[in-house]
Image (cartoon, rainbow, N blue to C red):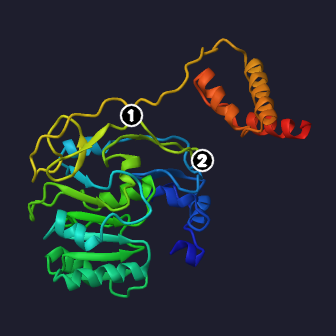
Amino acid sequence: TLVRRDWLPDNVGLAVFDEGRHYVADDWGRVGAGLMGCVRVLFDATPHRADGRGFRPLASSLVDVVSVRELVDGGYLVPSTIYAPADVQTTLARRPVDAYRAKVPGKRCIVYAARIEHARLFAADFLAAGIACEVVDGKSKDREGPLNRLRSGETLVLCNCGLYVEGLDVVEVDAIIIARGVSLTTLRQMGGRALRPSPHTGKTHAYVLDLLGHSRKYGALDVPYEWSLDGKAPRPREALPSTVQCRKCHAWGPGGGMCTDPRCGAAMPPAPPPCVRHRELSAVRSGDSVEARRSRLARWVVDAVGRGDNPWSAAHKYRGTYGEAPPRAWVVEAVALARAAA
C-alpha cells in the first residue's frame, strides 16, 4: 500500500518490518530506503533471498532469537514428518491426490502448484475422488471463504498457486503437499503453514508431502541453519543427518530410532555406513604460501591445457592437495593465460 501510494509517514522513530527479506527488493525496498533514519527491526523466519541480495545497510546485525526445535520443544509448534522421494527430481513422484489418499487421508491440507492450470487440474483430481477441494490463486476475488471452509472442515484440500507461502495462520492445517520446485526459504515457509498447534482439533503433528524431493537437499524443517546479512547462501549449523526410510510407512528420518510419523511407531533401520568414493590420497601442503599455491594452480592449468583436458580439473587437484577449493578468480585468470599462451 505504501509503495502504491508513494507515501511514508514523517518523524518515524521505530519501524518494524515483518517478513523483513522483502524490504530490500526493488519495490518494497523503496519503503525500507525511506525509513533509514530511524531504528529498524526486521522479523523473518527465513532471512535469505534467492537473488542473493543482502540486508545491509537496512540491518546492521542479525539476532538468532529461537530455533524451530526450541519452538517445538516449548509447544509453540508441532513436530513434523516429511514424505519425499529418495532424491531431488524434476517430475512429481506421485499425483497430489494419490499422495494425499496414501499418507494423509481426511487431513486438512494445502497443495502448492507451480501454475494456476496445475492447481485446477489437481483440484479436479481431488473432486473426482470425492474429496472436498477448492482452488485459490492470486486472481481469486474470494480468498477468505475457502479459508473459512478449510477451518471448519467443510473443505479438506485447498489447491493454490502463488498464495499461502507465508503469513497464513490457519492452525487447522494438518498437512501440505508441495507439487512445485522450492528453495530452502520457500520450503520452510510452506512447511510452517502446518506447524501451528491446534488444541481444538487435536492436532499434535504435521505432515509435509514433498513430491519433488527438495527436502532431501535441505533437510527436515527443524534443521538449524546459519543465516547471513550479506546474501551468502544459508548453511546447516550441523551436518545434515543421514536419513533412512521407514520400512513400514516409508517416512524419512534418522536411522536407529523410532519412525517420525507417530501413527506408525515402527523401528527405523540403522543409519547407513559412511559412503566411500575411491580417490587417490596426496599430501596436504598446508604450509605453502598464498603465492606458492597460486603458482602451483597456474602450472596445473597449463598442464591440463597442454594435455587437452578440461583446465578446471586443476581446481579439483588443488582441492585434493590443500583441502579447500581455490578462489574462482585464480582459476579464471590462469585458464585465460594458459589458453592465450597455447
Residue drawn 21% across and 68% down?
100
Residue placed most toward the observer, 291 or 170? 291
Residue placed most toward the observer, 178 or 93? 93
Residue drawn 73% across and 21% down?
293
Is residue 284 shown to the viewer in this render? yes
Residue 4 lies left or right of residue 135; in this view the side is right
Residue kind at label 1, given as amino acid type: Ala
Q: Which residue is mark 2?
A: 56
How far from the left and from the top, in percent, is residue 262? 11, 50
How far from the left and from the top, in percent, is residue 296? 75, 22
Q: Which residue is mark 1?
A: 239
In the depicted structure, whether residue 297 falls above or below residue 160: above
How far from the left and from the top, in percent, is residue 41? 47, 50
Q: Which mark is residue 145?
A: none
Q: Is disc 1 placed on a helix, strand or loop?
A: loop
Q: Is disc 2 placed on a helix, strand or loop?
A: loop
